[in-house]
Image (cartoon, rainbow, N blue to C red):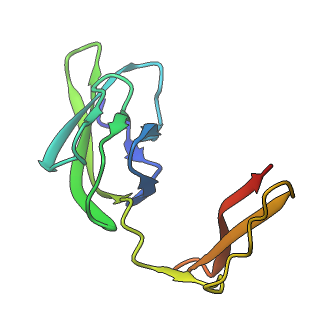
Amino acid sequence: MSTSTINFSVGPNLGTYRASNNYFIPLSISDSTPSLGTITFSLTTGTLPPSLQLDSVTGYIYGYLEYENDYLNTQNFSVTATKTFIDASTTSTSSNFSITVKGFIDTNVEWSTTSSLGIIKLGYDSTLKVIAMDRSQQLPQLLMRCLIE
């Protein structure tokens, strides 16, 4: 079946993901003869981020990303997809990938709230607002809003 080809249709950068969340990241394949065999996936070099796994049948990278101390931690790895045909012949393709895990130490935060957050008076509604800017995205983030009654 040498006329059949398979290729990864994603990558090489699979994205940046926040720690302490569940993820399902597909490694999509384009297959010129999809009905003529089965495809399996294997990690061939490098390592996945801790607690993520590669499903050898579906090609999904999945799992719960554990707490990450670093602000950004990039893992580089390669995956091989192998197609096995009915006559036991095979064809394969390999590709390099990376996944970046974003931890909770946001060193890119720039506080834009003044040092005076307001005054809380007994018996009156008071609102406190804290705003910061993520310098890597240049978007203001409302970090906390508290209504005290």
Q: Residue at x 24, y 45 (%)?
A: 79
Q: Residue at x 71, y 59 (%)?
A: 145
Residue 117 in percent (x, y) is at: 68, 76
The one nearer the camera, 72 or 48, is 72
User: What count of labels does the image hold?
Assistant: 0
The one nearer the camera, 33 or 27, is 27
The one nearer the camera, 70 or 14, is 70
Residue 41 in percent (x, y) is at: 27, 32
Q: Residue at x 39, y 77 (%)?
A: 107
Residue 120 higher or lower than 25, as above or below: below
Residue 49 higher or lower than 13, as above or below: above
Residue 19 higher or lower than 58, as above or below: below
Place residue 70 in its image quadrant: bottom left
**Which quarter of the rendered picture does the N terminus lie within?**
top left
* The furthest residue to the left: 45
Q: Is residue 35 left or right of residue 67?
A: right
Place residue 77 in its image quadrant: bottom left
* The furthest residue to the top: 86
Q: Is residue 20 left or right of residue 119?
A: left
Residue 76 in percent (x, y) is at: 23, 59
The one nearer the camera, 120 or 37, is 120
Q: Is residue 93 left or right of residue 44?
A: right
Residue 43 in percent (x, y) is at: 19, 40
* The furthest residue to the right: 124
Place residue 57 in its image quadrant: top left
